[in-house]
Image (tube, coloured by chain):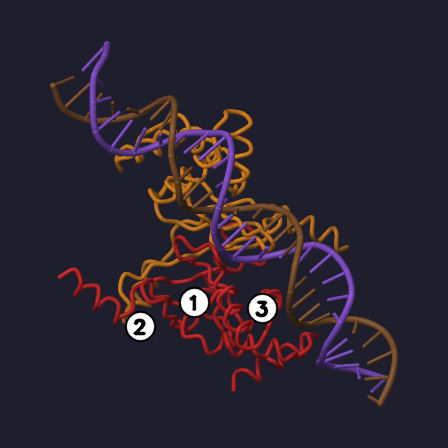
Chain colours: A orange, B red, C purple, D brown
Amino acid sequence: MELAIAMDRLLQKGHAVTPQRRLVARALLAAPSPVSAQELAATLGASTGIGQMTVYRTLTLLAEIGVAYQLAAAEPDRHEARYVFCSSDHHHHLICRACHTVVEVASCAMAEVDQDVAQRTGFQGVAHHLDFVGLCPQCAASETREAH
Amino acid sequence: MELAIAMDRLLQKGHAVTPQRRLVARALLAAPSPVSAQELAATLGASTGIGQMTVYRTLTLLAEIGVAYQLAAAEPDRHEARYVFCSSDHHHHLICRACHTVVEVASCAMAEVDQDVAQRTGFQGVAHHLDFVGLCPQCAASETREAH
DNA sequence: ATCTGAAGTGATAATAGATACCAAAAGGCG
DNA sequence: CGCCTTTTGGTATCTATTATCACTTCAGAT
C-alpha cells in the first residue's frame, strides 16, 4: 500500500505521523485528478474537521519529502497550486487539458539533458521542472464529435 | 530590433499597438531577470502612469502571442507569475536559483519526446512545460567561497 | 507505561496577487 | 477624417496563501 510508504518516509525524514497527515495523503492518493489545497480542505474539513492550515502545511511537507508533486502547468484562470500523489521515483506527468486526468510518464532521458545543459552553460546542479499537457483519447474523441 | 517584431506580431494577431503595450514590452525586454506583473506595474506606473490592470492584461496577451513566456519554475515563497521576453521560436530557460539570471537553452529534442509520449499514451496534441534551474557559474563560485 | 519537550494543529486575522466593472480615452480601418 | 471597436485605468473585490498563537498530540527516553 502506497500510503504506508508515504508515512514511512515522513518518519524517516524526522516528521511525525499524525492522523491528519494520513488523511490528507489518503485523499491525495484517491484523487482521480490534481487537486488544490482549497478543494482538499473543503472536502476533508467537512468530513473530518481538519483545518485548512493543516492541509496547506501537509501538502507542502509531502511535496518536500517527494511524496506529492506540485504541478508546474497551471490551468489558465486558476492561480492555485495543484498537487498529485507520487511515491515512486523521479518521473513526469502528462495532464489532459480537458478532463485533467494525470498519467505518469516513465522517467525519460532527462538526467542526461540536465547534464548536457550544465555542460553547455557552465551552470551547476541543474535540475528541471517539466510537465506534459495534451488531450487524452477520450477527450480527443468527444472534442472531435462536438466540432462535427 | 526585437521590439518591432513583437509589435508586428500584435498587429498580425488582430491586436492594437498602443503606447502602453510598447512600454510594457520594452520594459520586459530590458529586464535582466524574470519580472513579475507587480514589479513592472510599480516601475512603469511611477515613470509613465500605466495602470496595473494594463500591465497584467498586456503580459497575458504577450504570453498568448508568444512574445513573452511565463516561467513554470516559481521561486519558493513567491507565488506570483514571472515573465521573460522571448521573441524567438520555441526554446527553454535555464534560471539561476540564486541570482535568477536567465539563459536561453537552444531547443533540444523535446519535440521528439512529445511525439514519443503521445505514442505511448494515446494522448493527442502533446506539448510540454519545461524550465531548468541551476546555479550560474558566478553564484556557484560565491557559494563555494561562503561555505569555505 | 508514562512523562516531557518538541512538533503539530486549527480558528481567526491579515497579506497580497490577480480580476471585475465601467466610464473615459485612445487605436485602426473605411 | 470620423466612426466603431478596442483599450485603458481607478476602485472595489475576490481568493489563495500565510501569520499568529494558544491548545493538543506525537515520539523517544526513562
Q: Can residue A55 be seen in this view?
A: yes
In x, y percent, where is residue B134?
32, 63
Mark seen at residue B66 = none
**Amino acid at dot 3:** Val
Same chain for mark 3 and mark 2? The answer is no
**Residue ID for mark 1:** B109
Camera-near label (1 vs 2) is 2
Q: Do the residues labelled 3 and 1 touch (CB within 8 Å)?
A: no
Vertical placement of residue B2 versus A138, above or below: below
Foreground residue, A88 or A49?
A: A49
Task: Work out how far the residue at label 3 is from the one at label 1, CA to CA, in angstroms.
Answer: 34 Å
Same chain for mark 1 and mark 2? The answer is no
Vertical placement of residue A31 versus D3, above or below: above
**Residue ID for mark 3:** B55
Secondary element under disc 2, as helix, strand or loop, is helix
**Residue ID for mark 2:** A121
